[in-house]
Every structure is written in C-alpha cells, then in structure tokens.
Amino acid sequence: MNENRSALIVDDEHDIRELLVLTLGRMGLRTDTAPNLHAARQMLGTVSYDLCLTDMRLPDGSGLELVSEISTRFPSTPVAVITAYGNVEAAVEALKAGAFDFVSKPVDINVLRGLVRQALELNTRRLAQPDEAGRLIGTSPPMVTLRQTISKVARSQAPVHISGESGTGKELVARTIHAQGSRAGGPFVPVNCGAIPSELMESEFFGHKKGSFTGANSDKPGLFQAADGGTLFLDEVAELPLQMQVKLLRAIQEKSVRAVGSQNEVQVDTRILSATHKDLSKLVADGKFRHDLFYRINVIGLPVPSLRERNGDLPLLSAAILDRLSKAMKRPSPTLASDAVAALQGYAFPGNVRELENILERALALADGNTIHADDLQLPASTGMMPPPPAGHGHATPAPAAAGADPRTTSPFDTASSALPSYIEEIERTAIQQALQENRYNKTKTAAALGITFRALRYKLKKLGID
C-alpha cells in the first residue's frame, strides 16, 4: 500500500530516530533521517518526501522553523511535530505554523501509525479529488479567499473555529474541510451545542455505561466515539455551559474520553471543528467562555463572509439554488428576470444564504410560468435594504450634515441631505471615523469595537471613501 512512499525523520536523539525508522519501515515507508535542521534542509533540497516528522527542539534551532519552511516550499508534504508530553502550547504553535498534526513523547506507536496513515491518505485524496470546495459557490474575492483558505486548513489536523453570521453556511464550510482532508473516509458528526439539555451533555458527548443513572438501560457511546477517525463539528459552541467547557477542553487535549459511570478512559482520534455566530472573544472577556478552551479550538480562525460582502455572487448563487430546488420538485429550472436580480442585489439579507434559499423557494412556488420577477420574491419593502453605491464614479455626493451637528442625534429632515439612505451613510461614516480615532486607526480593534467583522469594516471604508 505504501510502496515507494518516503518519510524524513528529524530528531537529535538516536533512540527516537531508530524507533521511528523501525515503525515507519514496518508500514512500508522508505525513511531518511537527519539529526539537525541543517541536514534536514539539505535532504529536502534533493529528495521529495511524502511525510516529515520533526522534533520541536533541535541542536541548531526549532522544529517550528522547519514546519514553516516545508509549508511554504513543499506545501504537498505534511509535516508532523514531536512535542514534550503535556506541552499544549508548543503543539498549538506548531499547528498554527502549518503542521499537519503532533505526537507527544514518549511516542505512542499506535498514535504514530494513525498519524502516518492520515498523512498518506491526505496526499492520496489530493491527487484523486483536487476541488471539493466547488460546492461553495461564488467568484467574488471573499469567496475565492475562503476556498483557498479551506484548501490549506483541510491539509492539517488543527482545530478550526468557523465564525460568521447566521445563515452564511458555516456547516457547509465544515463539511468541505472534512471532505477535502485526510479524514473524508471517516464520519462527519455535527452537533448543535445549544440543542442538548445541560444535564445530558456529558452523556451525549462522552457516552455512558448501563446503570450509571436512571434510564441508562444499556451502554451508549458518545459523540466523540461516533466521530472516531473523522470529524466532530461543534455548532453553536458558544452555548456550552462553563462546566461542560472544562470537560470538553480535557477531552480535546488528552484525546481521550471517559463515559459516565466508567472508570476507564478511551482513546479517540477526532478532529474538532467548531462554529458560532457570536463573538467568542467578547464572551471570553465577559467571563462567559473559558479562555483556555477558546485558545484550544481557535487554533485557526476562519471567518465566513456575509451575503452583503459578496453581493456580486447573487446571480450565480441564485441560479444554483433554483436549479437544486427545481430538481427536487421535478420541474424545469426557472430564470430570474432582470428586475428580480436587481431586487435581490438591493436587499441586505440579514439571514444570508439561508434567507435567500427561503425567498427563492417561495418565489418558485408563486411564480407564473418559468420566469421569476421581482414581485414573486415578496421582499420586505422597508427593512433590510442595501445602501446606495458610494459617492463618486458618476454618482451625486451626499451633502454633509450641518456644521457641528452629530448625524446620530440630528433628524434627517433637519440636514442638507434628507434622503434616508444618505442620512444612514452619514451616521455610519461618523461612527466609523470616531471608532478609528479611539482605536488609533487599528482596523482589527475598530471592527471589534463596532461589532462587525474585519472584512465588513474594509467594505464600509471603501464604500464610504474613508482612507
């Protein structure tokens, strides 16, 4: 199975190198070894490897240097690090630097074999299915960036936290990461953390033994065991109570779980993906979410753009949704009339893609014939409308508010620009400029202070012409 596959082992301890050579050799891999960074770099310059295993501490530098170099120069070569037992910080840093996974000393041979199999499976899937992310529809810059980022994070075993507004498709992103990664052959287990009663959480996540509590009539495996060899997706992770956060953190760090009523722990091999529409960093600051768990699940942060941020994708996205809905109804796929496209592009979609799907499904049922017009969409008339195009480029520039007046406290009918959209723009401009000044023009902090994403802030700065 692993014929002609090769691995580079980088460690200054002779006994560790010998153990790894023996283990990988029995798996059918050809191995080369290097005692330091210098020797490893020379070998990488002349031989193409399917896998690299490196210690974190080397005589002439850190294994993190090698991780970064391989991730940049040889992106198709998974690199795993060997860390001291219990050194979670080092493991997290390695994953952030681009490591595929990590294994702790003393090296558990079974864990090592599983890691090697996952790494080799990753390259097999890369060759067989190079573009799973095609299910995420859109050609806008935010969507192109999202698909590129997914391709990178899918090659790792690092925990990924997916953030974004409700309805943006966070679970689809998680499923795509799973499908593109080495665990695609394993289970994908989604769980809505807000839907499990708090008193049943431990049993649901870790399982229980027969007789451990009233109603436990038989042994039951938990969600971690169900996701063994695959991916556990924790949707709405912000809803977890603090007591459960502690137990979840331990399970993630130790890669083992103990069922309710059991004395023994069971090893689990599960990748953790999580998502929420809430601001986890704010919840951490408010003491409502544990900092150590946030640090552990947010190794890689992946924001999903709102539909407002990729407005240009609406025609393509709508056509794909209508095609899918039509096939389910066994009827011809309709077309969107130009007035319908214009109406969709003028709407703000607070419910994002999920709301778009609902609107199009309703329109499909109400439309006469095979063309959907703006009236068929039944969009709200007075809420959720997009602001007009930015000033300049042939558009009239909205007049500023009266000198010395604050648009946030001034009636729109008392200003030179009484049109409501222009008035809203003036409010936004004032709020953003004030937040920029208060945060010393640090855009990341400004976005957090305004309660919007960094991408949304960039969009608004460009739209409003703020440098």
Image (tube, helix red, strand yellow):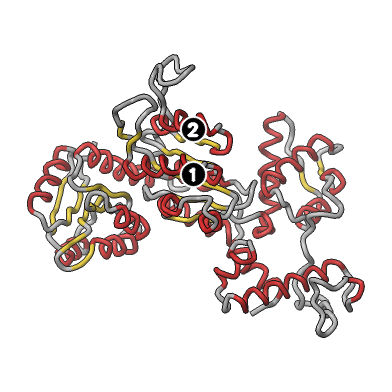
Q: Quadrant of the N terminus?
A: top left
Answer whether residue 429 is visible to the viewer in this image.
yes
Residue 201: mark = 2
Above or below residue 462? Residue 28 is: above
- Which residue lies under the disc numbered 1? 242
Label 2: which secondary element: helix
User: Quick one: 5 or 291, which is closer to the camera?
Assistant: 291
Label 1: which secondary element: helix
Residue 226: mark = none
Q: Quadrant of residue 219?
A: top left
Q: Residue at x 80, y 56 (%)?
A: 342
Dot 2 alpha-carbon crowd within 10 angstroms: few under 14, some 14 to 19, many 20 or more: some
Dot 1 alpha-carbon crowd within 10 angstroms: few under 14, some 14 to 19, many 20 or more: some
Above or below residue 86? Residue 23 is: above
Q: Looking at numbered disc 2 in the image, what kind of residue is underneath it?
A: Met
Number of labels in the image equals 2
Residue 321's x, y, as percent? 68, 42
Q: Residue furthest bottom?
A: 403
Q: Quadrant of the C terminus?
A: bottom right
Residue 101's x, y, as percent? 31, 49
Q: Residue at x 52, y 41 (%)?
A: 241
Q: Looking at numbered disc 1 in the image, what kind of residue is underneath it?
A: Leu
How far apart marks 2 and 1 lie (CA) works out to 12 Å
User: Quick one: 5 or 361, which is closer to the camera?
Assistant: 361
